[in-house]
Image: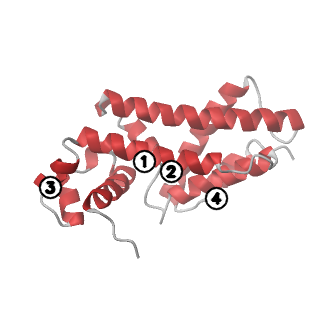
Amino acid sequence: METQTVREQLLQHAQTLLMTRGYNGFSYRDLAGLVGVKTSSIHYYFPTKEDMALEAVNAYSDTVLTAIRGIDPALPAEKKLERYAKQFGLVLGNGDQICLCGMLAADIESLPDNVRQAVQSFFKANESWLAKVLAEGAARGTLRVSGKVESAARALYASFQGGVLASRLFHSKARLEDVVNSVRVG
């Protein structure tokens, strides 16, 4: 079993706290208690909460976007969308957390600029991937797209983010399946 460094533990707990409480819902004192270190030790690794949040967003974004890019490009568009929805389902964990960037989007007015930009980049990367899948599905007649594919991708991504919120609220991943079914033909 691989032992995590204090820094890795802090980052992992920060991601979980961001996904369950948001940017303003935790402090270094919360992290210190979870990891078993003094708050001054946290400042050694992450001088400010902004530094920690930015690294948490970047690490989360890398993990999620790598998984999305790992969806087999040879699959039909509707199957890619199903795999994407499953990826969102993994974010829920035990049903008590949501997408880290989705949670931070709710805190957007209190986020430092660099964290806000990282969250926006995450959203744009997801929307871009979805636009390609929707265009492919529309061309093959397997996915419904009304209007411009880019607009449809933004709406679909918003639906996935909302689906995660509703899944957390109702403790049911079926809300994510509803999002996929809303654009499937037949």
Tell me if label 2 and label 1 are in contact, CB under 8 Å: yes
For the residues marked 4 and 2, what is the alpha-carbon distance in whole angstroms? 24 Å
Which numbered disc flags the more N-terminal residue, 3 or 4? Answer: 3
Residue kind at label 4, given as amino acid type: Ala
Element assignment for label 3: helix
For the residues marked 2 and 3, what is the alpha-carbon distance in whole angstroms? 26 Å
| Circle 2 residue | 63
Is residue 35 something one can see in this rendering?
Answer: yes
For the point 29% across and 63% down, which residue is it? 5
Give neighbour class at mark 3: few <14, some 14-19, many 20+ (Cα, 10 Å). Answer: some
| Circle 1 residue | 59
For the point 80% across and 36% down, which residue is it? 136
Dot label at residue 26:
none
For the residues marked 1 and 4, what is the alpha-carbon distance in whole angstroms? 27 Å
| Circle 3 residue | 41
For the residues marked 3 and 4, what is the alpha-carbon distance in whole angstroms? 42 Å
Q: Would you say 92 lies left or right of 133 here? A: left
| Circle 4 residue | 174
